[in-house]
Amino acid sequence: MITLYSAPLSLFARKVEIALGEKGLPFNRIMVPFNQATGYDPKHPEVLALNPKGQVPVLTDEGLVLYDSTVILEYLDEAHPEPALFPKTPVARARCRLEELFADEIMLAALRPLMHRTGPRIADRERRAAQDADAVIAEGLLARHYETLEARLAGRSFFAGDLSVADIALFMSVLFSLRLGGPALTGFPGLAGWYERLGQRPAFARVAAEIAEADRRLSCPVKAA
């Protein structure tokens, strides 16, 4: 049986949950405690023992221990190839991996300045003003990323031919942008339609609903864009 160590508001662990759901793979989920004031401290002892980075996601499967969402997703697609979440040809797989990297690194860099919005407001007014200013800059960068994604989608249903890891990663980045008060998808009809279609798939819908519920329990309200 696959075991996944996840967390309520972990973008990367939730990527893995969507992949497991799309593949129809049963798994035991261990949800690591989290709160907005202290994050993951104290860290889960099993996660600390299994992952030298001390963070989720961690996946175990018949004695195999994996961490890093990209490594986990590649393993799942090789161990359980149907339905495939990577394209068949080397060129298409490389492009798919680049889209995932764009989500996980390029978009994440623009998401980080928004993440303070869901936590308690700090007392230091100057630092608070600096955070808010950085967030406004990040919103503009995210809007430019939306433009890039709109162009790359170019009327297609998915980013890499069929549903793939690229769509899972980019969906999570857009979801986090929206939940953190980033730019709305107004003016990006292709991206908005893609996001809505994915959100109707059971694996995506379940994760999105659980994140929304976790925000109601754990996060400060964020004004919608």
Image: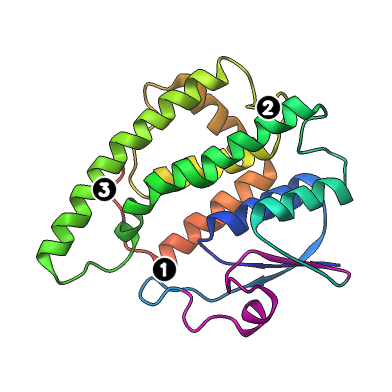
Q: Which residues are magenta?
A: 40-62
Side of 180 relative to 48 (left or right): left
Earlier-in-chain disc, 3 versus 1: 3
Image coordinates for residue 225, horizontal then vertical, percent: 30, 39
Q: Are marks 3 and 2 in contact (CB under 8 Å)?
A: no
Quarter of the picture containing the N terminus is bottom right
Question: What label does residue 160 carry, if any?
Answer: 2
Q: CA distance from mark 2 to mark 1?
A: 35 Å
Identify the mark nearer the N-term, 3 or 2.
3
Name the front one of labels 2 and 1. Answer: 2
Q: Residues within 10 Å of mark 3 (few under 14, many from 20)?
A: many
Residue occupying image coordinates x 80% and y 51%: 76
Task: Say if 50 sits above or below 207 in the image.
Answer: below
Disc 1 element: helix
Q: Quadrant of residue 27?
A: bottom right
Q: Tags 3 and 1 in contact by the CB under 8 Å rule?
A: no
Residue 216 at least partly seen = yes
Sequence-wise first label, 2 or 1: 2
Mark sitting on residue 112: none
Name which quarter of the figure residue 159 lies in.
top right
Q: Residues within 10 Å of mark 2 (few under 14, many from 20)?
A: many
Name the residue beneath numbered marker 3: 135
Helix, strand or loop for disc 2: loop
Is 206 or 4 nearer to us in this picture? Answer: 4
Q: Residue furthest left?
A: 126
> Viewed as shown, does residue 13 lie left or right of 225?
right
- Which residue in the protein does label 1 denote? 218
Q: Nearer the viewer, residue 124 or 106?
A: 106
Whether residue 200 appears in this view of the structure is no
* Residue in view at x 54 percent, y 33 percent: 195
